[in-house]
Image: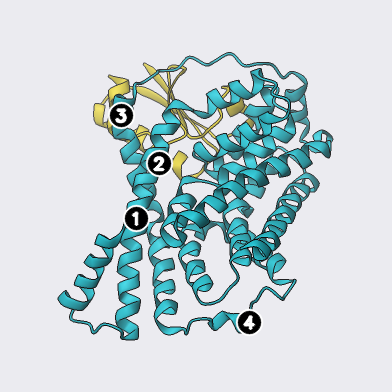
Chain colours: A yellow, B cyan
């Protein structure tokens, strides 16, 4: 099972990324754990600079912009 | 450069809609159509170009460059210039701040970046170009870079480290050059669709503000006489510039809509320096950003940060009123 993390302090872009991630997972019909990380101190453990960040299995896939549904599906395949 | 758009607007308003030329309503509508199309087009082109530039200079590389190189003061200029080319959203300001100080970058340089990144961003540049043309845009961009350098340098000299939140001070104490996190690298061709989509998203996101701003601008353009504001705001009033900055700071979310309105204010007699100071306040400092920064510094430090920047914005306003 894949672990997907969305890091962001709760700005509109972060929320859009989280929604897109959930939709991508649903559309693929796969099992994945989607975690939202909103706490700054926790976020900073991942050594990021811009938000939102999309991580799949601890690898940064997209940062500083909204991840699109198609993109996320591609990453998850 | 935009003659063809003006021809299109003329044709649409005067021929297709048969609204008579040189009527107040016709002129206002023409201004609205022309300016909306021009600014939307510029915005799309500039955000795309910035997206491409940024794929070569992502903020991580900037951070690593700044933390590894000691450049005898030039690093302030680099930090400021990098602030122009990297996209910025105020919700990234805290991760950025921490990420920079964590990498051992001095507070002053971190502030320089934090000042210039929102002040000179791609949306502001595009709308400035559309509304004021190349010369004024260049003045704005250059003064934004200089302001970042001077502001960051000043804040660095104030030794504000003790005003940071304890957990941030802890991070600074353990600062080190960062290892890069594992990450997928994409080529420009692979990225390009996402860059275009992002650019389109930015245009879409601010279009409502732009349309409202240009609509108000269009009405004033059509209905107010030239020089209308000169009787209220002129270079002789010493308090106009500080007032402009103070009014500008809380107006952040409407930055895209504010510039087209200010364009008309200037056309109708508001001094350009006062107008630039106002727009700097609107674009460069925002209350949402201040709220976010509360997580990493105390209120005193936020007040010093905002106060220092506002002070230099006011100085720029006076300076431009003298030389422009």
Q: Say few, some or many: other residues with alpha carbon within 10 Å of mark 4 (under 14 / 14 to 19 / 20 or more).
A: few
- Residue depicted at x 40% and y 36%: B51
Q: Are marks 4 and 3 in contact (CB under 8 Å)?
A: no
Left/right of residue A69 with respect to residue B144 in the rendered view = left
Is residue A66 at all visible to an observer of this figure? Answer: no
Q: Secondary structure at mark 2?
A: helix
Secondary structure of the residue carrying numbered label 4: loop
Which residue corresponds to mark 1? B40
State the CA–CA distance, disc 4 to disc 1.
Answer: 32 Å
Residue to which mark 4 is pinned? B232
For mark 3, what is the residue?
A: A71
- From the image, state whether disc 3 or disc 2 is nearer to you: 3
Q: Considering the image in quadrants, where does the N terminus of chain B appear?
A: bottom left
Check contact, mark 3 vs mark 2: CB within 8 A: no
Q: Nearer the viewer, mark 2 or mark 1?
A: 1
Query: Which residue carries the number 2 mark?
Result: A16
Q: Is residue B76 above or below residue B213?
A: above
- Chain that bears disc 1: B
**What subunit carries mark 4?**
B
Query: Nearer the observer, disc 3 or disc 1?
Result: 1
Would you identify the image quadrant in which residue A18 lies? Answer: top left
The answer to whether the residue labelled 2 contacts the one labelled 1, judged by CB atoms less than 8 Å apart, is no
């Amino acid at each position: 099972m894949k672990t997907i993390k969305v890091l962001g302090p709760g700005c509109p872009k972060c929320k859009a990324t989280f929604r897109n991630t959930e939709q991508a997972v649903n559309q693929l019909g796969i099992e994945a754990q989607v975690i939202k990380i909103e706490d700054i101190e926790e976020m900073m453990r991942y050594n990021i600079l811009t938000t939102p960040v999309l991580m799949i299995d601890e690898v940064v896939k997209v940062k500083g912009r909204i991840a699109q549904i198609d993109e996320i599906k591609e990453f998850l395949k | 450069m935009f003659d063809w758009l003006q021809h299109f607007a003329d044709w649409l308003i005067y021929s297709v809609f048969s609204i008579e030329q040189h009527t107040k309503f016709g002129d206002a509508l023409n201004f609205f159509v022309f300016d909306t199309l021009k600014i939307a087009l510029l915005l799309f082109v500039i955000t795309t170009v910035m997206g491409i530039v940024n794929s070569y200079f992502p903020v991580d590389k900037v951070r690593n460059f700044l933390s590894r190189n000691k450049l005898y003061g030039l690093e302030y200029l680099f930090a400021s210039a990098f602030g122009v080319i990297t996209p910025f959203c105020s919700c990234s300001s805290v991760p950025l701040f921490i990420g920079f100080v964590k990498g051992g970058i001095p507070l002053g340089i971190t502030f320089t970046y934090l000042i210039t990144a929102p002040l000179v961003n791609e949306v502001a540049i595009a709308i400035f170009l559309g509304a004021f043309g190349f010369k004024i845009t260049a003045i704005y961009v250059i003064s934004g870079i200089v302001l970042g350098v001077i502001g960051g340098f000043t804040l660095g000299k104030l030794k504000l480290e003790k005003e940071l939140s304890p957990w941030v001070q802890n991070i600074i104490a353990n600062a080190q050059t960062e290892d890069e996190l594992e990450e997928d690298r994409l080529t420009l061709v692979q990225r390009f669709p996402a860059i275009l989509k992002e650019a389109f998203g930015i245009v879409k996101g601010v279009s409502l503000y732009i349309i409202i701003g240009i609509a108000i601008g269009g009405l004033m353009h059509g209905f107010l006489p030239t020089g209308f504001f000169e009787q209220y705001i002129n270079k002789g009033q010493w308090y106009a510039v500080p007032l402009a900055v103070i009014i500008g700071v809380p107006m952040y979310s409407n930055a895209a809509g504010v510039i087209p309105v200010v364009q008309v204010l200037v056309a109708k007699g508001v001094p350009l320096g006062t107008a630039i100071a106002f727009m700097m306040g609107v674009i460069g400092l925002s209350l949402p950003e201040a709220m976010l920064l509360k997580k990493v510094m105390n209120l005193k430090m936020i007040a010093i940060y905002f106060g220092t920047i506002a002070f230099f914005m006011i100085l720029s306003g006076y300076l431009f009123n003298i030389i422009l």
